[in-house]
Image (cartoon, rainbow, N blue to C red):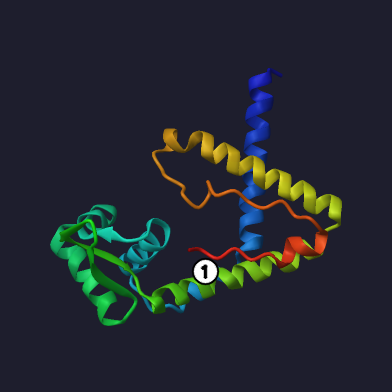
Amino acid sequence: MSADSVDNDLIESTLQLSERAFRELFPILPKEWLNLDLSTPQLKVVLLLLVNGPCRMSVIASALGVSLATGTGVVDRLVERGIVVREGDPEDRRVVLCRLSSKGEEMLLGLVQLARNHAELMFRSLSVEKLMAVRAGLEALLEAGEATKDQLGISTPEASKPVEKPKKRAGLAKKTQRRA
């Protein structure tokens, strides 16, 4: 067996394992996301704004793959529900930016917190050695993500933030990271 086939087999089995781990870590999200009462385009806009921060309407329409008028209609309904707000760009008063409102942020961060609580419970069931191995694996994934983001054509501002190393085991689970 060649080194390439061993690498391919290792990569394939690792991908399968990561898919299983993702489903185990985040089983609450699909159920909770379904309770949001958002259309698919609205959910896409909300996720876009969560990940990228404030965006121009042209960026939103492009991300949705729709016309500017259609994208504006989607955002209008989110504004009416208090999930998104429009505001002027401080650098260019002619530009209008859309961003998540406090209500929209709370809604999404609440869902993220549910998933985080589930993961914390799982991590607490691990020995220190296994938890450190999981941590090392996650750090390696973040490094790989940073190294390949240009190839993938994505920006990952959240992933590039440094993570504090734990000083004590108890401190690891108690640290909370809140998106600014």
Given residues 3 and 90, the one toward you in this image is: 90
Q: Looking at the figure, which quarter contains the N terminus?
A: top right
Q: Quadrant of residue 143?
A: top right
- x, y percentage for residue 21? 66, 55
- x, y percentage for residue 42? 32, 69
- How crowded pointer 1 is (Cα within 10 Å; few <14, some 14-19, many 20+) is rated as few
Given residues 142 and 36, the one toward you in this image is: 142
Q: Quadrant of residue 60?
A: bottom left
> Which residue is identified by label 1?
30
Q: What's the residue at 47%, 71% (across, down)? A: 108
Q: Residue furthest top?
A: 2
Q: What's the residue at 27%, 57% (across, down)? A: 64
Given residues 43 and 90, the one toward you in this image is: 90
Q: What's the residue at 53%, 49% (across, down)? A: 159
For residue 112, above or below residue 132: below
Callout 1: SS = helix
For residue 111, above or below residue 50: below
The disc labelled 1 sits on which kind of residue? Pro
- x, y percentage for residue 85? 28, 73
- x, y percentage for residue 2? 68, 17
Q: Residue furthest front?
A: 91
Q: Is residue 52 left or right of residue 61?
A: right
Q: Residue furthest bottom?
A: 81
Marks counted in the figure total 1
Q: Is residue 65 left or right of residue 148?
A: left
Q: What's the residue at 66%, 44% (across, down)? A: 139
Given residues 94 and 116, the one toward you in this image is: 94
